Image (spheres, rainbow, N blue to C red):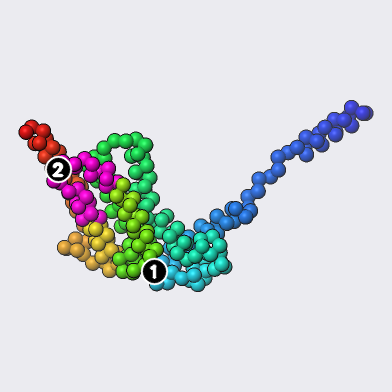
Amino acid sequence: MARKKNKAVEASEIVQEKKPRKIVAGPIRDKERTKRRLIATVGKVLQKYTYAGLTITNIAKESGLNPKLIYLYFGNLDGLIEEYILEKDFWAGKLKTQIIEFAENPKPINAQDTNDLFQLQFDSFLKDKSMQRIIHWEMGVKNKLLRKIAEDREEVGKSALDVIAAQFEDTDVDIQATLAVILGGIYYLTLHAKNNGSTVSGIDINEDEGRERIEKTIERLIFRDFEDAKKKKTSKGKK
């Protein structure tokens, strides 16, 4: 009888030793959920009202959250907008990841790598309405936050350009100028096509045929500069 009682006590002790249930909600998770909701709402407000409508009142209204949470989690409205833009920005996100990969596996960035990068930029910008609004916003409004974000983007871009430009040393081929023209063209063509459906030089990039023409031209310009630099280096080596 005593043995049975002891076994019953041991069994009850084992049951009590079960691991506590994992908490699926709490202050940390709730905070992250709230931050994600506020960041996502910036995009919704941007689409609905354009950049002039990015106010604490509109963001709180669209998100259904207390406006005080913006100050609590982001410091102010600019902090929230900056967080949103950094998530959407191609150069701050996708390019930075690629640069880290280049740094960890150092090798020259060739014509194909450069072309892939700018084709990805073209495709990404063409599809991302929020990023189109952000670039349009930067062009049309004088704003300290937008200036800072543009300068940060430029700094990231410069890191990649420095790696690419290193292969053009001792030549008169200005690859950075070529890439600046390509990037400016991507922005201009896309904003025209997506804002009012207009064509540029008779090319409509809303249509597959027009978009493919631009993609081929980007590739041709990049490969042309790499080939020219290679020929000039070879010519110098023979002298």
Would you name the residue on which mark 1 appears?
51
Q: Which residue is mark 2?
A: 171
The answer to whether residue 192 shows anywhere in this view is yes
Nearer the observer: mark 1 or 2; the answer is 2
On the rendered image, what quadrant is the C terminus found in? top left
Q: Image point 41% across, 66% down: which residue?
A: 46
**Amino acid type, callout 2:** Thr
Q: Position of residue 71 (x, y in %)?
A: 53, 64
Distance in Å between CA atoms under marks 1 and 2 = 44 Å
Label 1 or label 2, whichever comes before in sequence order: 1
Outermost right residue? 1
Magenta span dominant secondary structure: helix
Q: Please name whichever residue, 48 or 184, is drawn nearer the observer in this view of the structure.
A: 184
Q: Residue at x 70, y 40 (%)?
A: 19
Magenta region: 160-183
At 39% from the left and 63% from the top, the residue drawn is: 145
- Is 57 one of the magenta-colored residues? no
Q: Secondary structure at mark 1?
A: helix
